[in-house]
């Protein structure tokens, strides 16, 4: 059975200029031990969909879903109090900016132990021992001394390790990492990605990796879901996605990578992602798509079968299924 | 070979911090002894991680602050603070964050007009206006954008505006400080193409600062890899990328994720992090993280040696 299963998730924000649909009918399925990458550009709704799962969106957001199940429990029907027993324990999340996600007023040790106390009810001695163990697991040198350090005394890489230690403190079964390495240097990025995949292999937890970096996806994920303007446009295992993308957007995105360039001028995707007021009636990618015709402009595309990467396209690459 | 447009020799920049009333101020050596030459129409990329001194180098070259030691020249004209005013036209800069570097209260026309109003006093209003429109067309901004404000534009369009502003005074050298790092992938390629087209049409010389090696590999002719304020390896693109000789360059290349799941490669694992620029180790700055470090590396600093492809290491890789 799937660990996490979300059907038809939509999130709308009430803004001064009317409602804005940030996430549009998204399905997410994650099995135990899976590594799913959600890729997309800014505004594709990749963070918002996961924040909706965590219940971390502000009151202006309206979340609707046909199904939102974690480990067989329906998250929609749950009271906030029951839900809080799962969030932070069985589902944990790490964020992009390690420096600003830690509370500057408390020591690192306090922040790691907080969850251990709330969720696991450990006594002070056990909490301290577990915190030391966690600091070692994430590769922080001299953990005993670092536990009493404040966030400003640590570098970005170290802060991100602390965030990871906090997230895995209660042995979550699903870890959501939202751009965990975007703010870090490449050599530190490599360390953090290695750490995340090693922890994943060791604990068997499932990992959802939200990123915009195709390189990170290729080296880390097993399955990839591509999002564009709030919709999932394609989902495939990582190998086939890079080798034979079915949605024109995925294909154009891969072609725009400088490392895949064959000519001095790079292939580009003209235009920009549609905003609140210029959402096209048909396919959302149609205005930028090389293959779009009148059908694409006017009719929302169907979702293709798995053999065509679940592409949300009238004319998937590789021919009709 | 043509004479270099930009020539730098032994550039250093030291900041003093703290100290208080009686304490001794401490020194941060942000940039130490950096030398390079860039020929007209070429691109030199400066790569390295945060704290390696690449942005300090940009500030020195654009004459925002003077070097603490060393000298540099533009088209053979020695640059000294006394001559800054006359030479600043020649070097312009494009910053990383197009959201922070444009004044939100100025229209596009005013943003682009300002450099002319200040530096080209002889031009009439109509001439300035014509020049603004000409440069807007050059960078691919539609004429109707003329009276709009920056908030009405996406990141890519804003970066075009920032590039247009840098081009207003017809500079010879553009310093590009992480020009595409804040942009989405689909927009990044548009801006990179624009930069390459402009270089070809206007014969511009680029100092391209970036941490993204796949972008650097695509746009540059020569590369300088920096670590903690010093150049550790310099050379032509093909030499540095295909036959890296400094262990740090090798580690940096192997740490860069490749968008190709079929090519699983062995990563060189660097332990530890950059030492603080407040107390740079005596020997090779990279010795603490290097897997080849020997006692000699910790005692003396390796000089940057070699012809063409230069490397600062006692035990360079075979390449």
Image: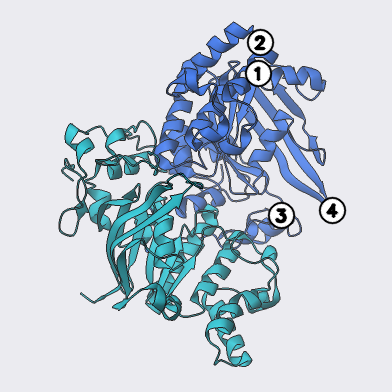
Identify the chain drawn in cyan.
B
Secondary structure beneath label 4 = loop
- Relative side of B219 to B243, left or right: right
Q: How many angstroms separate mark 3 from mark 2 (CA)?
A: 49 Å
- Mark carried by residue A120: 2
Q: How many angstroms separate mark 4 from mark 3 (CA)?
A: 25 Å
Identify the chain drawn in blue.
A
Q: Nearer the viewer, residue A63 or B107?
A: B107
Q: Earlier in the sequence, mark 4 or mark 2?
A: 4
- Relative side of A94 to B10, left or right: right
- Residue matched to label 3: A282
Q: Earlier in the sequence, mark 3 or mark 2?
A: 2
- Residue matched to label 4: A16
Q: Nearer the viewer, residue B77 or B180?
A: B77
Q: How many angstroms separate mark 3 from mark 1 (CA)?
A: 46 Å
Q: Nearer the viewer, residue A277 or A309?
A: A277
- Relative side of A14 to A247, left or right: right
Q: Earlier in the sequence, mark 4 or mark 3?
A: 4
Q: Earlier in the sequence, mark 3 or mark 1?
A: 1
């Amino acid at each position: 059975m799937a660990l996490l299963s979300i059907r038809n998730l939509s999130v709308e924000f009430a803004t001064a200029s009317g409602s804005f649909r940030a996430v549009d009918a998204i399905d997410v399925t994650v099995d135990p031990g899976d590594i799913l990458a959600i890729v997309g550009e800014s505004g594709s709704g990749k963070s918002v969909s996961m924040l909706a799962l965590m219940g971390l969106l502000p009151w202006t957001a309206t979340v609707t879903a046909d199904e939102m199940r974690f480990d067989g429990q329906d998250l929609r029907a749950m009271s906030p109090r029951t839900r809080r027993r799962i969030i932070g324990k069985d589902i944990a999340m790490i964020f992009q900016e390690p420096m600003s996600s830690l509370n500057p007023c408390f020591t690192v040790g306090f922040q790691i132990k907080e969850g251990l106390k709330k969720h696991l009810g450990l006594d002070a001695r056990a909490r301290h021992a577990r915190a030391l163990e966690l600091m070692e697991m994430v590769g922080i040198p001299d953990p005993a001394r670092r536990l009493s350090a404040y966030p400003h005394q640590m570098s970005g890489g170290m802060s991100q390790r602390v965030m990871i230690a906090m997230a895995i403190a209660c042995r979550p079964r699903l870890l959501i990492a939202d751009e965990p390495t975007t703010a870090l240097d490449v050599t530190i990025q490599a360390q953090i990605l290695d750490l995340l995949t090693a922890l994943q292999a060791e604990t068997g937890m499932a990992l959802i990796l939200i990123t915009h970096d195709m390189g990170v996806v290729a080296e880390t994920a097993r399955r990839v879901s591509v999002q564009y303007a709030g919709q999932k446009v394609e989902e495939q295992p990582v190998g086939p996605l890079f080798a034979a993308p079915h949605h024109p957007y995925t294909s154009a995105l891969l072609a725009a990578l400088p490392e895949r360039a064959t000519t001095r001028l790079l292939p580009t995707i003209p235009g920009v992602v549609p905003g609140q007021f210029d959402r096209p009636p048909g396919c959302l990618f149609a205005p930028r798509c090389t293959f779009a015709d009148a059908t694409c402009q006017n009719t929302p595309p169907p979702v293709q079968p798995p053999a065509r990467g679940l592409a949300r396209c009238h004319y998937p690459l590789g021919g009709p299924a | 070979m043509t004479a270099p447009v930009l020539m730098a020799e032994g550039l250093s920049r030291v900041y003093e911090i703290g100290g208080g009333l009686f304490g001794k101020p401490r020194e941060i050596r942000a940039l130490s002894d950096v030398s390079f030459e860039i020929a007209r129409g070429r691109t030199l990329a400066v790569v390295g991680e945060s704290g390696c001194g690449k942005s300090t180098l940009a500030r020195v070259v654009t004459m925002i602050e003077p070097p603490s030691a060393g000298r540099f020249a533009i088209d053979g004209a020695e640059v000294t603070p006394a001559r800054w005013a006359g030479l600043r036209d020649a070097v312009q800069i494009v910053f990383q964050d197009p959201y922070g570097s444009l004044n939100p209260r100025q229209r596009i026309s005013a943003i682009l007009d300002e450099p002319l109003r200040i530096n080209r006093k002889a031009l009439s209003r109509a001439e300035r206006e014509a020049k603004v429109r000409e440069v807007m067309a050059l960078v691919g901004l539609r004429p109707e954008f003329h009276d709009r404000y920056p908030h009405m534009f996406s990141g890519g369009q804003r970066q075009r505006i920032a590039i247009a502003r840098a081009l207003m005074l017809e500079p010879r050298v553009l310093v590009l400080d992480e020009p595409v790092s804040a942009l989405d992938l689909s927009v990044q390629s548009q801006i990179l193409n624009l930069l390459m087209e402009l270089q070809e049409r206007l014969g511009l010389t680029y100092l391209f600062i970036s941490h993204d090696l796949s972008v650097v590999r695509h746009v540059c002719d020569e590369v300088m890899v920096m670590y903690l304020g010093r150049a550790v390896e310099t050379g032509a693109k093909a030499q540095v990328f295909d036959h890296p000789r400094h262990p740090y360059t090798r580690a940096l290349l192997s740490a860069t994720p490749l968008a190709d799941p079929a090519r699983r490669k062995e990563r060189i694992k660097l332990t530890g992090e950059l030492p603080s620029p407040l107390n740079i180790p005596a020997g090779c700055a990279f010795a603490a993280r290097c897997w080849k470090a020997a006692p000699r590396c910790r005692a003396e600093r390796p000089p940057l040696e070699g012809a063409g492809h230069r490397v600062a290491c006692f035990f360079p890789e075979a390449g």
